[in-house]
Structures are given as C-alpha cells and as structure tokens.
Image: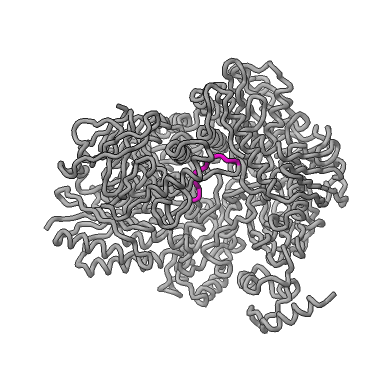
Amino acid sequence: MQDGRITNGPGEIGPIEQALFRNAIVALADEMALTIYRTAYSGVLKNIMDYSTAICDGTGRLVAQGLSLPGHLASIPVALQACLRHFGDDIAEGDILTMNDPYDGGMHLPDIFVFRPYFAEGRILAWASTVCHHTDVGGRVPGSNASDSTEIFAEGLRLPPLKLHERGVPNATLLRIIDRNVRLPGRVMGDLRSQLAACEIAHRGIAELERRHGAQGLKALLDHTMDHSERLTRHALLELPDGEASFTDWIDDDQIDAGVPIRLHCTVRKTGDRMVFDWTGSNPQVKGAINNTWSYTAGASYCAAKCVLSGNAANNDGVFRAIEVIAPAGTIMNALPPAACAARGLTGFRAADCAFGALAQLYPDRVFAGSDGGNTGVTIGGQDSARRPFIYVDFLSGAWGGRPTRDGLDGNTNMFANMASFSIEAIETDNPLEVLDYEMVPDTGGAGRFRGGLSLRRTWRLLAEEAVLQVRADRATHRPYGLQGGGEGAPSRNILNPGTSQEQALPAKLTMTMRRGDVFRHELPGAGGWGDPLARDLDAIAQDLRLGKISPDAALRDHGVVLRQDSLEIDPAATEATRHARRSRP
Amino acid sequence: MTALRIGIDIGGTFTDLVAISASDAIHRLKLPSTPHDYAEGVVRGVGQLLASLGGAQVDELLHATTIGSNAILERKTARTALITTKGFRDVLEIRDLRMPRLYDINWTKPEPLVARDLRLEVVEKMRPDGSVAVALEAGSVQAAIDAVRHSGVESLAICLLHSYANPAHEQALVAALRDALPDLPISVSHEILPETGEYPRTSTTVVNAAIQPVVRAYLGRLQQGLSDLGLQAPLRLMQSNGGLTAAGLAARFPARIVESGPAAGVVGAARLAEALGETQLVTFDMGGTTAKAGLVENGRVSRAEQMEVGGGVIAGARLLVGGGTLLKLPTIDLAEIGAGGGSICRLDAAGAPVVGPESAGADPGPVCYGRGGRHPTITDCNLVLGYLDPQGLAGGTMKLDFDAAFAAIERDLARPLGLSVPEAAMGMRRIAASTMMRAIRAVSVERGRDVRDGSLMAFGGNGPLFATAMAEDLGITRVLIPPMPGLFSAFGLLLAQTEHHLTRSWRRTVTADLAPALQAEIDLLCPYVASHLAEDGFPPERRQIRLQAMMRYLGQSSEIAVELPEEITPKVIADLPAAFAAEHRRIFGFAAPLSEAIEIVSLGLVAIGRPEQDGLPNLAPPQGGTPPASRSAWFAGLGFTDTKVVARNALLGTPAPGPLIVQEYDATCLVPPGWQAVCDDFGNIVITHA
C-alpha cells in the first residue's frame, strides 16, 4: 500500500508534502499541550497532566492529538460532535464553545471542554480542541469527585454545549454562573484562560498552514492525515492472527452497595484489518459514581489495542475507523442519565485491565499481567487554622504487571494514565498535612517468572482541626491478575491510625471526617506476575532479596528458594530439590 | 614564544582542539578520542599542537567533556550510598512516576544510581517552615554510619526532607560522618541544590556523589599529563550552564559539568551574537545523530531549570519526561531532536516517507561510507544532490561512494514513491528539516518568540548544509555560519566566561512591604556565589552578579523569571506586578488583571567573572589559498546545475550569489539559488536573500 497523491486540491500534493504536513499538525497539537502545561493554575493539570489537546477537522473528526492521557483518546471528537449537533450552522467567527455534560458528549463534570473554530472561506475548516480536569466544579464534596454520589445532580455544575465567547465577546452570564458554583473560582478561571491560550496558539498555527496550502489543500491534507493513520493501523492489524477471546474482571464494589462486586466483560474479535471490543455482558449501570460514558470505555479499548499494535500510528480518526467499540447503553460501560459518574476513572482503569486480559489470550507475548488496577484518588479537604479552604487532591499509582520478557515496573505510573505524583515537600507546604512515609512495600508484587511491581505506601497526618477524607481505591477483594501461571498482586489497603491502639482497617472506598492528629495510610495493590514462579531466575531472586523487595519467607513460599542459614545467599542445590518436589506435585 | 589559550572539546568520536594566540592566530586539530581514558587523547593533542608550534607558553586550558554524562549513561558511576529521612528512601527510585513513552509495555525505567540496599534512613523530620518536627535521633545516625562503613562505598549523598528550609540536620549528619569516615566524599543536598522538591534535589545530589570519584580521577590524570608536558596553566571546565569554572570547583560540584560540550557551542554563538549586535539568534547545531537548537537574546543564552541525562531526544513538546536521570541545575536550554546526517530514510508500513529516529551512526554509517550501511541516510541524500564532495572532508581521508548511495535511494525511496532520485533525496532533506523544526520551535515559538525577527546561526558537521533550508521554512532571512563550524564547541570555549549559578527556594506573596526581607535574602546569597568567583581567581572588580526572581500568579504552578536589581527599593517591589504581567503576556499571550496576587517562588543568582580583556579575536580568514572549483549540484526548479565550490576566504568583500558551496576543513556550507553569501570581519559567513 502506498500514499496516493492528493489531487482534489489546487495542484497535486505529493507524498513529501503530506509527510511535512503530518509533522506540522502533530507539532501544533503538541504546542497546545505545552501551552496548557506552562500556563495552568492547578496542580491537577500540571503535575497529573489530566488534560488533552487536539486539532479536529470541520466535522469534528480527530486529526491530531497532543500528548495526553490515553483515557482521553476518544473524548474530544465525541464532545465536539455533540456541540456541532446543538449549534448546527449557528456558529460564527469569534465563537468559542464549552461543555462538560457527560450525557451530552462529555466524560465527567470536572472535565471541561473548550473548542474554537477556524474559519476559511466562510466555513469551519478545523477546530482547536482542549479538555482539562478542573480542580472543582461544585457539587457536594470538595474536588467534585466523590465516588458515593448516586445522581449526577449531586456532582456539580452541569454545562450542556454553550458559547463561552460569542463573536469574540466573553459570555458574562455563563462566567458568573461558573464563578458562583465552584469552590475555587480563581483556579477554574485561570485554567479556562490557559485552555483559551492553547486554542489561540492552534488558531495561529492553522492560519499559517492555510496560508501555505490554501483552504482546499488544507482540507485535503487533514483528510490525508487521518487516512494515513488508518492505513498504518489496518496494516498492523493484518500482521496479527485472527481470533476471538473474552475476559471478565471485577470492581470490588461501588461504595453504595458495599461488598457487591461489579462485573466487566470484554470480548475482542479480530478479523483481518479490523478489531472489535465488545463490552456486552458487563454490569448494568450502578448507583455509585463510577459509571463510564461511551467515550471513556472507548479510550480504554483504544489504549489496550495500541499497546499490542506495532507501527505506532498517530492518534486520530483513522485509528478509530479500524477499531470498533460496542458498549450497550444502560451498562456501567455506557451509562444513561441520571447515573453518577464523577469517579468513573476507576472503571476506565478496570476496563483497560479487562481489555488487556482479553488481548493476552490472543497475543500472549504482547501483553503484561494485571497492573495496580489504576490510581487511587485521595482527597482531603477542609479549612486550615486561618479558616482558609484547602483541597488536596492526589492520585497514586505505581506498579506494572509482570511482562512476557521482564519484571513489571516498581513505582511507575499506570499505562492508562501518565500521571505524576505530588512532591512530599509541596504537599506539606501547601496543606495542613504531614506525610509520614512514601515507599515500596515488600512481598506485594505477584510472583512469577517475571514478578509484578511492588505496592507503594503513603501515609498522611492531619494538622488542621478537621477535614473530609475521601478515598477511591479498589482491588482490595479482586486482586490484579497474573498471566501464564503468575500469581495475583497484593490487595490494596486503607488503614486509620496504623500502629496505634486506634488502628482500624477501612474499606477501599470511603468518605469520612478526619480530626487533628489522625493518620491515614494507603497501600496500593501490587501487580500480577507473569509465568511460573518456580521458573524465576535465581539471580533475579537474589537481587530482590538484597534490595529488600521480597523476604526470605516469600522466596521460599512463592519461588521454592532455599537460603543458606542466617544469610541471604541462595542454596542452589536445596532450591532445585524444593522446586523439583513442587513441580512433581499434582 | 607566543601565549596561547587552548579550547578542548571531547566527543564520542573526536577530540577537537582550537588554540588562539595573543596575535589572534588560530590553530586547530581534530584527533580520535581515546574512550579507555579520554585524558590520554587530550594530552596527546595538546602535545601535538605545542610541538607543531615549536613550543609556546600556554595561558589557559578551557575544557568541555562528556565524562560525567558518559559515566551516568553507561552506569559506570562510583558505588554510592544515600541517606534520607526515614520513610523516604524510595523517593530516588519512585521518581515522579511518569514515563516518557506511551503504549509500550517493554519500556524500562533507568536504574537508580544508588541501589535500594545502599539507601539508608535516619530518624528526623523538618517542617516546610524550617522548624523541627522530629529531632535527629543519634541512634539512627550511628546505625547509618556503621552501614556506610560496612558497605564499602566510594561516595555518599545526603538528602533530608525540607533541608532547603533548615539544613541543621544535614549539617549535623555531615559532621558526624566526616568524623567517622574522614576520607569519604560527601555530597549534601542543601549545598548542591537548596531548593524545594525532594525528588529533583535527591536525584541531583546523588548524581553529584556518584560521578564525583570518576570526575576527580579524570581531572587528576589530565592535570598530571599536562604537567608532564610542562604545562602549569590553569585548567577551567565548561559547566552545563554555559559558564567556566576552575577545575577544583568542578571536582567538588561535578553535577554542574555534565552537559558541558553542547553548552560551549551555544556560548560561543552568544558571544559572536553580542559582537555582531544580533538581538535574537537561534542556534542550530546538527551533527551525525542529533540536532540541537538554542536561543540567544541580546547576547544572553536561554536556560532551562533542569534536564535529564539519557532522557533521549524530545518527542515534540517536552511533556514526556522520565526517560533519564534528573538533574535540576541551570542548563543551557537546548531542544534536541534525533535527526542528523546518519538518520535513516525509509518508508513506513503505509508507504509514506519517514526520516529517523533510527540512525546508521558512525558504524556502519551511511551507505556512501562503504562500511556495510544498507539504508540510505541524510548524508547519502546530500551526496547524490551534489552538496557533499565525493572526495570527502578533511583533506580526502575518507572517500564517499556516490553510486552506492544513488542505488540505495533509488531502490528504497525514489522508485516506490514515483519520484526521481534527486527529488526523493530533496524530499527526505525537507522531511528531516521539518522534524528538526520542532527543536527550534521548542526554544522559540513555544516561548512566544517570533523567530522571523532574528537570525539563525548554524554549526556542527551538518548544520551549514541545512541552515538555509531551516531558515526558509521558518521565515528567517539571515543565516550565519561561524568560523570552524565543525569544531565549534572547542572554539566556543575560547569565548566563554566564568559563571556560577545558584537558585534558592524563597516563597513570598508580593506585597508592598516586601523590600527589606528580599534585600536581606539577597545580601545573604551574594557572598556565597562571590566566594566561588574568588576561588576561580577573580578579584572583586571583575565580579558581576545578576539576580532574578522566579514568579507566578498565586495558585499557578509554573514560574517566569523576572530580573531584579541588587538594590531592592520599595519602587522595585511596586513595579514587579507590571513587569511580571508584561513577561507573562509576552510568553503566553495573556495576563491576569493587575490586581491578581503574585508570588515569588525562588531567587536565582548568576555570578560572572569577567575576563581581563573583553572583545573577540579577529577571526577573518587570511586571503589566498585554493582556487575555486565546481561540481554539479541539484536544486529544485533548476535540476542539476554547475555549482561553484569555494573556500571561506573567497567570500571576503562582495557578496557572492548562490548556488554556491563553501567547502572547509571541518564542514560544508550550502548557499542555494536565491541566497547570497559574504564573509564578515569576524570570519562568519553571512547568508541573506539575494
């Protein structure tokens, strides 16, 4: 297959011009992302990079995506197309659109979209597109991300597609409504300004491209850019054998119906140059705030697919054409209003785990075992001693599943969300909190020929009079899965006042009051192992022992490794004998 | 005997020496590097240079070296231990969690420079305001000392939480360890980087500790070798920040010299820009595997606050971090792209042309090297277009195989694309240029600078071949090729000055009454950097200090630098919000209302040691030399055209129109049709639109 020459523009656009354009348009989307990174007010954007930028064509199809969260892969075109349905022809030069309604193309309320059209010859040729997770959009809890809301009406300010600017004039009414409905309006307004700045950068860049190629040429090149990704994606799909496989994974519960597990079920069907992710068989939508929108389920599906496909096609509509996502309405994978969805991040992570699980059966040498199950959201909010409000929102993650050729990573962000952790010194400077530790927990990675990554632990003490603590964790009862004989990772744990007489185990998801001096500890799940633990290389085990990543007890229990007395030195003969005996056991 | 200053730059393949005498005579030498001991090659080179001059007095040796970054990249660092606050020994390994690549399950984190069993803890804790939360527990200190003693480490790093706010516990720990282990080198975080952020501070302190024995040993061997040659001249090292420092300080703070090679070229460019009155200059340094861009404004180089060693080249916007070892020290801000002469040109699975990031490297190298390279590279494209001489560079030591390059391009690119060989080769050059453009945009457009307002200075072995192509795409109308573009880092060393940089966390909201507190802090910091200059041998009258505040809107999470005077009056404070807003608007295109609260996050100091004599040497090439030749080169719209090939000195006087090829000892410069070239008083080739 070859790039054809584009002849529907003025003159012929050859393969070299096409390649130059692809570089330019992706660079522009990246420049938008960098603009937000540099100008954002909130740490959620800067540290956790919970935002995405893109350039879409006039019909709202994704052409180029800036570096961004995998979970946002499908979000922008879905939201933009909802806006286009609302406004039809009623979009003028100088208009800027915004929205956050999950039931009208959005994801969850904190994710506010901003779109700016680029007009040429009286028609919209392209859209500068951004979405940012805002610190707070009102609702019943600080941070607007409680997992125990049961209706979207409790979750904050809900914006259908609206005009943020109309013909160049800011919509004062809308801005006043936002200002009155959020807890930290300065931060939200600052972050909206940074979204506008990114759109301005894109606008200038698109103007430059139009000057070079003309409106017709630009339109043809946008089409070509999507077609090129489609060809690469279909080519990568053709390389893989056909097949169908299903996998079931579980969310522990939704905090409302405590202890009732929630089923995720994914069937992957791969035929020729197509792949289908079919989520039929997943749980009906739930009362708790962990319901996915279709676009978020699609993001998880695309992320898993991209990890097994070679060739790394640029993210755009061309990729989506080759990969179909089916998520029945009314299920947790594609909820209907008024289901709550603020904490749906968890379901996205589990959807990625589940999709990987299905792919692992088709392509075992290209998929890792279950990772930490996604990040844990910890929010501590209240007032400091001067009665100034504070909201500390952090997302912790840390362990990759064992891989077909090597151990899972310790202390690394989850594949589904390239997020940073907050600095300890920054947390303590900005909040009435003391952090007591942040470290790896030994013996928590799933055993395997290639072991899973270790759990991370972080412990906080409250220094203010009182605060509301919310935690959205999971994988406490349904642990990260192993593959090819590898063991499960350790479960997550929440503990109040550890090591004291008031020590108390807490559920994975909780909302509670902390009082001055209370200590809260979270331990992430460890990741699953890959392959037979008895086949693990002795040098790797010796190193884990030396580094304190596994204990001598675990070495014997999981790997059949015997140590010489009072040392960390492995006894190869005794080990081989133990391993042999275990292998011959039925 | 004439007095010489010698600049020495070590690269992976070549060691470059450029010497300049008091009478501005220039001597240059390129010889193979000696990776088993780089000092050996340097000493040999200096010896050869002196021998060729029949002896000379040497005033100064100025040196850029990759010894530090090589040690980190190859993990040939010293066995090092780290002491942290209890509960936080894994900060070094957890890093900030982020990864540089998405959708790649085989990505692997770089190994931490201190293994987990050598990361020790003491019981203590400071609060962010510098008060003590947990006193330093003597028993845990003793346990750490015992563990260090038994571990047999060669170097030690110490980084405790909030030590930037109060270093008392770190100081007590250092005292106890020096007492117990007087010979062990110790790097302590409040000295290396007195700034908030435990991961960057830990990582930087650890780098310093882990490369210190390596750098010390290297400098020791080098100084011994030079002294064996009878040289007693001072040795100064280039730091990543673009300033020189005495060898003694470099040995104490080796983390500061990790990126010394690339820095030297940009500093040289900055000094030339200053002399030429160029207000805005983009530097473009293109070699065999990477291209680097930097920005010089009013003679000042733009700097980044941190860098990653081995982080790989940027994948567009610099958002994907975590690929390397973090160093948070002021560094000349260079954006790097994986494109160079060795970049491989191919078609992707969809049949579309792609350049790089794979490189043929030096071995097997491009097809035309005839060393077994099978994939066409950018150098092969330059050869078939006639831009490179088939007789090769540097006096024809390596001939290039035109026919092999032509055949490979025809087979892999031209035929499948339906293009002629020169069209395909030119197309690949353009794609490479559009990739390298991202480096230039990263240091200019992404900072709100309009590159069309300034000039482009190109160097490195391949820079002069691509300079006009880059300029045309960027809308730049003035291109400069400095003297010795292929040894420009060595040359840049001769133009550099001594500098020391210090950043310190100092967080205050800007209020009208801030002046006394700010003045007090500045008065505290200035003597520290001044003492470094004294150590470098600069008398007070040749010392200069520049100050800046890193500022942001309250609640924002990234900062902008605003210059401060040494004397902080109430008026200085009153003017700060407007100065900050103007800078914010310039960079980001918007500013918040002036009523919006602003805070200072940290203070930055630059102490400069001014040379005894300012001014640049006279670098114009002497008249005379080889007569012009010509060869057939291909240009769009013209096809193959008989093109003049000249030496730099042929451009003295009146501008010569393109097409034109300037062929030199160390690089080849292309002047396409529509451009003209002239050599200025400083020896630069100045290329402008005809």
**Is B566 in front, or is A303?**
A303
Q: What residue sits 79% from the left and 42% below the top? A: A290
Is residue B255 one of those drawn in magenta? Answer: no
Q: Is residue A195 left or right of residue A308?
A: left
- For the N terminus of chain B, which image quadrant? bottom left
Image location of residue A520, percent across then percent down: 72, 55
- Which residue is nearer to you in this view: B256 or B621? B621
Q: Is residue B357 magenta?
A: yes
Write the residue at 36% across / 53% down: B261
Task: Give the position of the C terminus of chain B as an image quadrant.
Answer: top left
Front-most of residues B178 and B395: B395
- Magenta span: predominant SS is strand
Left-right relation of B525 to A510: left
Would residue A230 be visible to someone looking at this image? yes
The percent position of residue A127, horizontal first and vertical second, equals 61, 26
Q: Residue at x 49, y 67 (%)?
A: B173
Magenta residues span: B350-358
Residue B663: percent from left, percent from top: 27, 43
Question: Which residue in the rendered view is the most extreme toward the left?
Answer: B1
Q: Is A239 situated left or right of A215 in this image?
A: right
Q: How many marks?
A: 0
